[in-house]
Each structure stands twice: as structure tokens, then as C-alpha cells.
Image (spheres, rainbow, N blue to C red):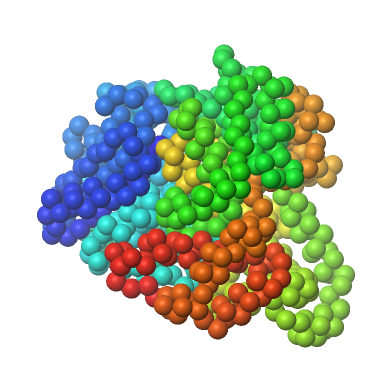
Amino acid sequence: MCGIAGMVRKQQSEDKIKDILDRMVDAAIWRGPDGKGIYITDSQNFTVGLAHRRLSILDLSDRGNQPMILADGRYALTYNGEIYNYKEIKEELLRKGHTFFSDCDTEVVLHACAEFGVEHAVAKFNGMWSFAFYDRDAGTITLSRDRLGVKPLYYMSTKDGFAFASDLRSFFELPNFDTALNKAALHGYLWNMYIPAPYSIFEGVSKLSQGSVLEYNIYEQREMIRKYWDVGSVHVDFKGSYEEYVHTIEELLAESVAIRLVADVPVGMFLSGGIDSSVITALAQRQSEKVLNTYSIGFFDKENDDAKIASEVAKILGTNHKELYCTQKDALSLIQKIPEAYSEPFADNSQIPTMLLSQMTREHVTVALSGDGGDEFFIGYPSYVSNRKQLLFRKLTGISDPLFRLISSRINRYDHNKWVIDKFLNAKDITSIIHLNYITANDLINSIFPINLSSRENMRIYGGDYHLMKGADIVRSSVSQSIQYGLTDDMLTKVDRASMYYSLECRCPILDYRVAECALSVPTSYNLHAGILKAPLKDILYQYVPRKVVERPKSGFGVPINKWLHGELKEIVNDNLSEERIKRQGIFDPEGIQKFAEEFNRQNNPILDRIAYTMLIFQLWWETYLDNGKAGKKVL
């Protein structure tokens, strides 16, 4: 896995571009500690530069170095990712007369884009990627991001040119980079915990959405974005029985695992003891000729320790299992590192154990397989089902709205009872129920960060523009929205940044597009068979692990953040919400923040705690990047 960057500038010297690119890719050196390359060329009055940081996984020789250029010099590529079916595509290209000098997937990506065009090429790829493909004759740079957005890609277009990078901190190296915050993105982040594509925390920088290509015309200085894959285009058309579906999923997962075990470096498995990671580990060990290494993390002070379940599953499957038990002090010490690891405000607190797990795993292997995606594609979140019940309940009880509005109007906005009542009142239809928490939190967020947003923009910052097939029920709608936003911008962002911070490549077999499309091609009742969450994955797992081992409540992969916020973290939270700090920043409403801080300190309210943690992480991020005077010329 790697880090990429690039830029186009008019009438700029090659030495100047090289210096900027050198610093851009070094800004997140841990994404590619094994090597660096820079390619610069002139195109009429423009200078084009591509840069690369390499984490060697396939073909460890210098033949895999990037940026990679075709022999005639027309095409160049800087690429971050893994294409697991690259050998099959290579065979097709060989039949068309292409010649290769390496055995890495990078060269296949380059030739495929040159032969088929980027959109047709990526349709053939099975993997995870973000890349930039330069076509000298066409005068274009084309960016692409994989179907589900496993790998990140930021970009910006200005009157001075165009720039892109894997990591947001790379843009700080651009001359006169404007650090004006995106107010809508920040407003949404305060509840979401993350910033969804196409937004970034900065007004002038965007994220390329999952399943998209962006073509930038160098001479006309304009960009065009197209989707080549989206969840809404997958139709319900599976004709077999439930049992046939489970068999098909097992075969697809087994093949997906097999191709992700291929590497020229050591490979291991994340094993949490949950259904998803246990299925992946079981299928991997079944196919492996050697005993696999599995890794899990536990906490001494957690009431329900999932590490014990993971250890039991590992013993049954026969893996070489390693676990790390962490103290509260170990976990808390990572909070100060979060801004460096994530480079953009990100406050899903399960990032802490994910970073600890990645750090431990990297001491033994360079690649790890995970179970990410199981909850989204196979209906694993209880909220998917409760959303359906809530919709029915609202239809039956809507007549009582006037009474509840009256009660709500007389309750303090910081009271948890008001939250419960307002959620009931806001749950009007499928769309509002899917976004219910954000809609309900809006009044509270506005009290500390008041901005005027259109109703459409207000919904977009919580992923309201998802593409959904016509006539989908509320469960399917919830799944679709979750895959297109929560999965990419929360779950996969969490894992990518945490693992890459320790130069560990994380591969997710459930996110194989064939598995994803199969899971999306069946009626809801198949993935929720007999009302059981993730029924297909459970039926596969029970062939390898007894039911009693995994049929127990999971405590989740989080930390007791609410306890910490009112304990060890309380002083740092209050310090970061102090009137002096807030006024000096000039971002949030001082009076609103002080009232919020008073209520946070007075009560144990999970809603206030969530916002307090997002505020803490933002403040630490702001202090890291914007409070030292070196990042840019303005904040708001």
C-alpha cells in the first residue's frame, strides 16, 4: 500500500514542482516507507508532476517503483492499492500485444488504462485503489477511486492549477494553501464523527467519492466527475433459494479470501471474535497450507472482553494467535496521536483500539485481512430492523404529535428526555428515520456552531444524496445509505488511517465487489433470514465454529469513552472548551459552548458525551494543524 500525490501548475519550474511534490509525499511517509519516486514533465505551458511513496507488497524489486511510465512516454501512473485479479487482466493484455517488465499489479493498471481507457479498465479491476493516470496526448489527468472507497483520494482545483493526494496534510505543502474551514462539513462532523465525501474539512479540498473517476483537462483547467459503480445500480435478481444463496456467498468469500492472501510479504488476520472476522479467518485457514497468524486486542477494564472469544475461536480454528491486553493508560495515550494519524477531524472512538491492534500486528506482518463490511452488506446492525419498526410505530401513533410537541417545548434542550421525544417527532418517513439522529441533534449543534444551511445541504452532510433503487423498503434504504456513506467515510476511513499509520496494509474480503453485488442482489429476507441478523454469515461460520462460542453478546470494538470523558479526560475536555480557547479560535459560539460545557459537566448524558468527544478531537486537530501559524492564512 502506498501514498500518492500530484499537481499541475502553469508556467512553473520543474525544480519548484519537484520540491513541492517531495514534501507532499513525505507529509505522510508512513503510507509508503519503502521508497519514493517523482515524475515531472512539461505539457505546453503547464508542468505536470506525479509523486509516490511505496509500501512494497508485490514484486519487491525496483521494477515495481512508481510513478510508472510506458515506454513511449505518453502515459504515466501513480497508484495506491492492490488489484487482486491483475494476472488475469495481464493475460488479456498480453494477447493484445502488450509487453511487461515486472510482476506487479501497478504495471497492469497502467497498461489497462492505456488500452481500455480508465472507466473500462476499472470495471475489470477487483481490488482497492486510488490512482492518477496521466495521458500526455489527451492533456488529461484521470483520478479513480475503488467501488467502495477503501483507499482515500483528496483533490483541489484552483485558478493556479490542480492537485491531489492520498493524505490531507499533503496540501499544506502547496504555496498559499487556503485553510478556510468548510462550515457545512464541520457542522455535520460534530454529530457524524466523520466528514462524508465529497466534503473535506477545508473549503477548497474535496474527496473523490467511491466508485468514481475524475477527469481533469489540463489545458482547459476543468474537471468532470462520473460514477462507474454505485449501490443503487445493483438490482434484486437472485433466483435461487436461501440455501443456494448461502452456498454462493461461501464460494465467493472463499475465493475473495484466497486472492487476498497472495503477497510477497507476511500476511496475518484481524480476529475480534465476532461473526465477520471469524468467518474470514475460518475460510482463510481452511485454504492455507500453513498455520495463519491471528491478532486481537483486549482491555483489562472492559466488562465484556471480546479478546477471550477471539482466543477461543482461534483455538478451534487452529491459528497461531497473539493478543495484546491494554490498560486504560495505553488507550488514552493514543488520543494525542489521533490528529497525526487521521489528518482530518475524525472521532469514531473505536479508532483507538484499531490503532493499538494495527500497531501490534505490524510488528509481525505487513498485510492483515479484516472482516469489515459484514454488518453493512448482510444486515448486521440492529438499527436496520428497528428502523422498520419505528416507521410502523409512527404511522400508528402520529396523532399524538401535538401533545409531544408541547411537552418537548418545555424541556431543556440538554435533557435526554427531550432527545427521546424529539426523535419520535422527527421520525416521519423513510428518509427522516434513516437520518434521525442527525436531524434531532441539529438544534443542539446549532447552539454551539450556528450556521445557515439549506435543507438540501443540511441533509447532504449526513449522506442524504445516496442513490437508491426505486421502491426500496426502509431496510434496503438504510443499508444503501450506510454502504455509500457510513461504511466508506467512517468504518473504512478508521481502518485505513489506523493501519497505514503503522505501515500495515489492511485487506477486506467481504468488500470484494462480487460478494457485495451478490449480497445486494437478494431480497432483504435472505440476509435477515428468519429475522436473524447476518444469517448467511452465521450459517457459514457454524460449519467451522460451534454456535455456543459465538452466540453471545459482543461489547463492540470501542472503548468506555463516556466513562473516560467524565474521568481522566474531563480536564482536557474542559480546557479545550474554555472561554479563552473558544474566543481565540473564533469558530464556535462562546456563549453556546459555555452552556454546553456546564451541562456536560453536570450530567452523564450520552448525547452530550458524543458531541464533547467530537469537539475534543476537533480541538486537538486544530491545535496540531492550524494553531501553529504554518498551515495557511485563515481559518474561517
Q: Quadrant of residue 31?
A: top left
Relative to 437, residue 79 above or below: above
In the image, residue 239 above or below residue 45: above
Residue 40 in view here? yes
Q: Quadrant of residue 251?
A: top right
Instruction: Say which residue appears at 64% left-offset and 60% top-offset.
Output: 567
Relative horizontal placement of residue 542, taking residue 566 as reference (left or right): right
Q: Nearer the viewer, residue 520 or 452?
A: 452
Residue 5 visible in rendering: no
Horizontal relation, residue 88 to residue 600: left or right: left
- Where is residue 231 drawn, in percent x and y? 58, 50
The N terminus is located in which quarter? top left
142 w.r.t. 434: above or below: above
Task: Name the residue located 53 percent from the left edge and 77 percent from the top edge.
Answer: 449
- Residue 300, x across and y down, in percent: 67, 41
**In the rendered picture of this protein, how many numbered marks are placed on residues?**
0
Residue 496 picture location, percent across and down: 48, 44
Q: Quadrant of residue 188?
A: bottom right
Q: Is residue 162 above or below residue 120?
A: below
Q: Nearer the viewer, residue 447 or 97?
A: 447
Q: Nearer the viewer, residue 252 or 449?
A: 449
Q: Residue at x 66, y 75 (%)?
A: 599
Residue plotted at (41% across, 70% down)? 181
226 relative to 529 in the view: left or right: left
User: Where residue 212 sits in the image (x, y, percent)?
Assistant: 45, 51
Q: Quadrant of the C terminus?
A: bottom left
